[in-house]
Image (cartoon, helix red, strand yellow):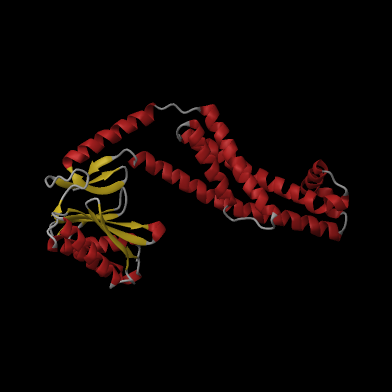
Amino acid sequence: MTNTSVLQGLANNCRLQYVNEPEPAAFGVFDNFGIVVKYLASERQYIILVSAAATSDEAVNGMISSLSQFAGERKKTINYTSYLDKVVTISVRDVGKNTISALQEAVGAATYFCNQFGFVPVCKYCGNQMDLGFFAIGGTVDTMCTQCFNKKQAETSNMAMTEANKQFNLPMGILGAVLGALIGGVVWIITYQLGFLLFITGAIIVFCSCMLLKKMGGKLTIGGLITSLVISLVMVFVAEYLAVGISLFTQGGSELMLSFVDSFKLLNMLLFDNSLNDVGYGMSSAIKELKSGMAEDMIYGLISYVVAAVLFIVDYAKEKKVKYQAIRLG
């Protein structure tokens, strides 16, 4: 099952609400306590969050002990449990078709322990027990009181204005994009000389270029992103060309008495002088092998480049949409 279908199934079974944006999450009141359930794709686990405050130290100790025992008896489904800063947390592994039932059990346990030890529903930010609700702040589903939400809404609004007024330093941004692409290109060249070419080298070029453009330019704009992607694309071809030329020099330069410059002159002849294809079967075969090898490298590099470029574009669009968003969900 997909993580969205699991969260939807949990929401249906536990009478919670489900949202797909700004992030997939199930949320609502269960057994008198507000809960939020999310999926962490990088760790393949679901996180259950219950905002609740203890009325005594004994209650805290009882909660921690019960959570620990609950996790210890379910090592196949529970990663960890904790109670910290007014939040009960239970991490549930993605266990396939049994995930929904494991989540239901964990949600029930969390709220049961809260009631058992006299915990009360609160806003984890200020401790307020009144006017609690569910909100999306900067793309993150959370529960808090309306007063804290209003404060965070004002903060995100101010941040949005600050970001909008921030000027993009075009010269420094372009310099950052070029330097980042060069760093990725060096990684490409080094791995090639070591006898292999990482499939993700194209993505590394994109990542370094975009991140340094943002760092040195002060912000990431759509124009800056396009500039960085164009520079990265050029670097994919340049890096392969330099890698092969350096390889010719290091592996055959001494035997053929070629200087560093002569090695690239030879590479240019092999790539662009079609008359060499007719000098003999052995030479023709070697040239075809060189070209096919470079073509294969380029295909792998361009695939990873495209994947990274699409991810950056999607992340940029999503960030622009939800980074400074503050809305009430329920």
- The quadrant of the rendering that contains the N terminus is bottom left
Q: Position of residue 220 (x, y in %)?
A: 45, 35
Work out whether residue 8 or residue 121 is closer to the camera in this orientation and state it. Answer: 121
Left/right placement of residue 207 relative to residue 234 reads left
- Residue at 15 percent across and 52 percent down: it is 121
Q: Is residue 213 above or below residue 12?
A: above
Q: Position of residue 107 (x, y in %)?
A: 22, 63
- Residue at 86 percent across and 54 percent down: it is 278
In which quadrant of the rendered view does residue 90 lie?
bottom left
In which quadrant of the rendered view does residue 100 lie?
bottom left
In which quadrant of the rendered view does residue 184 lie?
top right
Work out whether residue 13 or residue 180 is closer to the camera in this orientation and state it. Answer: 180
Work out whether residue 23 or residue 57 is closer to the camera in this orientation and state it. Answer: 57
Asked if residue 187 can be seen in this view, the reply is yes
Left/right placement of residue 319 relative to residue 190 reads left
Asked if residue 90 can be seen in this view, the reply is no
Q: Position of residue 317 (x, y in %)?
A: 40, 42
So how many labels did they put on this image? Answer: 0
Point out the residue furthest to the front here. Answer: 57
